[in-house]
Amino acid sequence: MTKRAPSSALSLPVSLAANPLLSSWIRFSPEGHVTVSPGKVEIGQGIVTALAQIAADELDVDIGRVQMMRASTAGSPNEGVTSGSLSVQQSGRAIRYACAEIRQIFLAAASDRLGVGIDALDISDGTISGPGNIRTSYWELAGDVQLDRDATPGAAPKISAQRTIAGNSIQRLDIPDKVFAHPRFIHDSTLPGMLHGRVLRSKMAAAKLVDMKEDGARAVAGLIAIIRDGNFAGVVSETEDGAEAALGALRKGAVWSSGETLPDESRLAAWLKAQPSELAVIDKKAAPQAGQKQRTVRRQYTRPYLAHASIAPSCALAQWSGDRVHVWTHSQGVYFLRADLALVLKLPLENITVEHMEGAGCYGHNAADDVALDAVLLAKAAAGRPVRVQWSRQDEMSHAPFGAAMAIEIEADLDERGEIVDWRHSIWSNGHTARPGRAAQPALLAATELANPFPRYIATNPPQASGGGADRNSIPLYEFPSWQIECHRLLTMPIRTSALRTLGAQGNVFAIESFLDEVAAERGEDPVSFRLRHLRDSRAQDVVRAAAKRANWKPDKRAGVGYGLGFARYKNTGAYCAVVAEIEGAEDISVKRLTIAVDVGEAINPDGVINQIEGGAIQATSWVLKERVRFDSQRITSNTWTDYPILRFSEVPEVQVELIQRPDMDPLGAGEAAHGPVTAAIANAVFDALGVRVRDLPITRDSLIAAMELTS
Amino acid sequence: MPRIRFRLNGVATEVDADPDRSLLDILRGQLGMTGPHFGCGANECGACNVIIGDRAVAACDTPLWSAADKDVTTIEGLGSAQNPHPLQRAFIAEQALQCGYCVSGILMSAAALLMRNPAPSGADVKAALDRNLCRCGSHNRMVRAVLRAAAEMAAQ
């Protein structure tokens, strides 16, 4: 008999409470398969494998029997959006509890059929057996057991020591297809009779389409339709190159008037602070008695707009049948996208089916949802044939939402010993999310371009209870006597922003950890001890100690080499991560090594966690050393890989990850834990090597020179 | 329209198409080979890399005419689940990807490297893959996988 955790859970996991029907999560086939249907989607993070592990473990079946369904509004549980490092936390917990209950339901049915008590039964690879070689199975009982019933609180999943699949680094289920190039990506999918569409967009931001000559496009072989609705225009063709050629012809005959003026990219902080904004006090802590302030230190940090810069331009397929439309998308939230499509199309939700297919890594809210609306609009002219639409690299890098630029001010009062007695943290930034499906108006690009346009949705911030947006990770984990944290959310949005991996956490952790490093250095205190002295959470202390130990903190001083530390607990409720960066250089910085300790509680797939942390660390290094969306007064200019360079193989640091295993703690997501700490660790290592504090990202030759001039 | 002949993954292939069209269009369109991926259309990311002769090239930036009478290998010709190339085995063993969109191009750059240099150093691998972009940050695993494949091929 398998040992069970005490059934302390009086309420269901959040995703299961929202979608209690057990059969919506799990089904058994008489052929010997378990179908698992999560509401979260694969975006390269390996979630499909981790969820299959959880289900297989809890049900006691071989993982080879588990078939993972792609999310679809046609029947999947509605788990909102796959974001915020919550897939294991939400979907994983729901599946674990659903499977635990389903296992009990089957044991009860088997007990009835076999005439022995539940306690005498055991399950091995789906076969339920008891004394005297009596046996049945999930597959045999599947027809008789009714799973069209709601989950009930109190199911008791296995205790950690009983798990045999979760907790192991099994190979990801999707990797063979990707290595053998079996079509798996939406980009590689075809439907019978499929046509190809392209959308015409100006390089200028929010430009108006004044005139569009169609003759050139009409002459292109294979043209099916030219579509125009206000400033939205596109073509549909029998072939992809026909669509490209028609689009090229349309572009030649298009006259645009300039849209709105973009800010001055060289004075971004001043611009952010001058915009109309909405002020929110994020947190306030009062000291029992005011400390003796001797002086005040005030520093400003900035981060530029960052592009998601997926390797694949966004792509979608759509097919109309009467007044119903089917959409295939790599959106992170099929139900949310459906809600926005319904708003634009003025159709009831049930007329729209949105089905997920894998795309390339998106790293947040990129153009996946936008291109889905594009496909739906173009497919209206396709007489019931499916239409595949793919954005260009240029459009992907200029019209998709960006991660928001941030200006962050930290001001601290120090006493005569240089100890912090009061801490103030202020943020100026656009909102960090403008995802679809959240508001009474759509957030999709084409919706703002139609003849009857919807207003542009101005990005907002999720509440702190959901991790916050611009303010994510702005509340210190350190024990300062008092603080006030505030956030100014811009009410204008000339440059479109939405969720990019970590939302505001990268900027805030960079600011906090840089500031602390400076305070520690001024006190002549080692940055590791300084942090340990101010951290109360032992798991936080453990990752800081582990990273420091593994990096032999602090190695002897060598010319041109620097070491820096960064720490955060993502969202203050997620994974703990500490990083030691080793950098080299004078004018051009290269990051040689990142030594990372991470605690995600129970790691369902340890190698998957390490892969996510490594990837996050390398992506963050790219953000820090290279990335900045460029623009002039009229348009985004960084719309190619030449103008928006990312880290290359020759520039990638060695990354060592130490996973602190806590199998009895709730599992936490790993995808966004490393970005903030890596950013801060690199900046602090630059100071260690060069004695210069760079407070404006990215850390490039130019920003180093600017920081040196400021210092001298 | 002129006929262009080349060998695609070892098979004699003939295409009727404008010789100035990109090889990627022809592969993904007419020939239905979706392994090479479109990423940028400007030879800047490597997602569409194929091997012509013994060189990895960006198919998006290669006119069809330049493939005439040559040997063109795509990821589909590298190996299969039944008969994997050592690189494919190594990428699975090292779990050397996250989203995997860039991987077909990276495998072709790596395969071309191993044709020229069967015993590369880590730095050689990084140099050979430097024109391939990966946004997920799987670079170090990929380098390890290429070295692993090279070692396996040397041992055979």
Image (cartoon, rainbow, N blue to C red):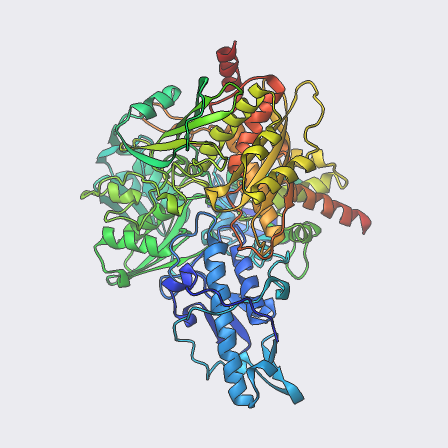
Give the image location of residue A699, x and y in percent.
Answer: 52, 24
Q: Is residue A383 left or right of residue A124?
A: left
> Is A678 in front, or is A202?
A678
User: B103 or A596, which is in the foreground?
Assistant: A596
Front one among A346 and A491: A491
Residue A287's place in the image compared with A68, above or below, is above
Asked whether, in this view, residue A349 is left or right of residue A59, the answer is left
Residue positioned most to the right: B155
- Quarter of the image with the N terminus of chain A is bottom right
Q: Position of residue A19 (x, y in %)?
A: 38, 65
Residue pushed farthest top?
A712
- Give the tally of numbered discs: 0
Please tell me which residue lies in front, A600 or A416.
A416
**Residue A400 image position (x, y, % from top left):** 37, 39
Res A11 quadrant in image: bottom left
Say whether residue A387 is visible.
no
Residue at 43 percent of width and 68 percent of height: A153
Q: Position of residue B48 (x, y in %)?
A: 54, 43
Q: Is residue A513 visible?
A: yes
Residue A596 vertical position relative to residue A354 in the rendered view, above or below? above
